[in-house]
Amino acid sequence: GQSLEQPSEVTAVEGAIVQINCTYQTSGFYGLSWYQQHDGGAPTFLSYNALDGLEETGRFSSFLSRSDSYGYLLLQELQMKDSASYFCAVRDGDNFNKFYFGSGTKLNVKP
Amino acid sequence: GAGVSQSPRYKVTKRGQDVALRCDPISGHVSLYWYRQALGQGPEFLTYFNYEAQQDKSGLPNDRFSAERPEGSISTLTIQRTEQRDSAMYRCASSLEQGSTDTQYFGPGTRLTVL
């Protein structure tokens, strides 16, 4: 089966850098995605890694190591508005159109 | 509107009643997904459509749940004989093409409460 593990909660101060880790187990791998969800809001897509390495999009970067079944989301220059839950997601190795989401990491940014 | 819309946004029903939840995806999006999301958890996959074809329904919990997308656009998730355990946020998401990207655009969800 498929499973993803993320820390349940992370706290950091404004202006700092924070890393949110995700380890996954899949029967086949098609890439790792990250979504952000503010309280009361809908998940919004942040990034996608299919190959090893770092993908950078503004203040956010995402890293993947397929050999370690591991990825992380890096948030730099933290702002209060970054306080949200962050989910990693993978496709099912046997059912390509089926996605599994982690249980989410709640990021608390403090002044 | 430009985004995914869902209706109703809130639905309160009594146990045993049927409910129909509607999703209007972004225009032109081929792929449509239904998820259920419990508070403090990630979305849980229910079913997937490619155009009007339901290509994966492996996440539907039991045969009380069904979904359709008859014209390849709007989709309806129907729950028959609702039970209290069905109470949750139901979200749909759409994406432009099947498999070309993992970018899904989520709707605001329907909060279902079964009394």
Image (spheres, coloured by chain):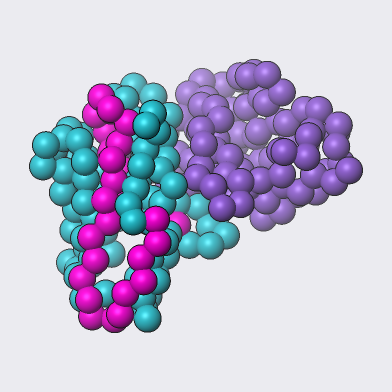
Chain colours: A purple, B cyan
Query: Can residue B100 be seen here?
Result: yes
Residue at the front extreme, as displayed: B1
Residue at the left extreme, as displayed: B70
Question: In the shown orientation, is residue B73 left or right of residue A108?
Answer: left
Q: How many marks?
A: 0
State the image coordinates of residue B43 (x, y, percent, origin top left).
45, 51
* Front residue of this view, candidates B8 and B47: B8
Question: Residue shown at 71%/31% (left/top)?
Answer: A74
Specify the quadrant that holds the C terminus of chain A: top right
Question: In the shown orientation, is residue A51 left or right of residue B65?
Answer: right
Magenta includes B27?
A: yes
- Residue B41 versus residue A99 in the image, above or below: below
Instruction: Specify the quadrant of the image occupied by residue A22.
Output: top right
State the image coordinates of residue B10 (x, y, percent, origin top left).
40, 61
- Residue B51 versus residue B68 in the image, above or below: above
State the image coordinates of residue B109 (x, y, percent, origin top left).
41, 51
State the image coordinates of residue B78 (x, y, percent, origin top left).
21, 60
Instruction: Specify the quadrant of the image occupied by residue A86.
Output: top right
Question: Residue shown at 63%/19% (left/top)?
Answer: A57
Instruction: Specify the quadrant of the image occupied by residue A69.
Output: top right
Question: Residue shown at 25%/24% (left/top)?
Answer: B28
* Front residue of this view, candidates B21 and A107: B21
Magenta includes B75?
A: no
Question: In the shown orientation, is residue A81 left or right of residue A104?
Answer: right
Q: Which residues are magenta?
A: B9-37
Query: Can residue B58 be seen here?
Result: no
* Front residue of this view, candidates B2 and B67: B2
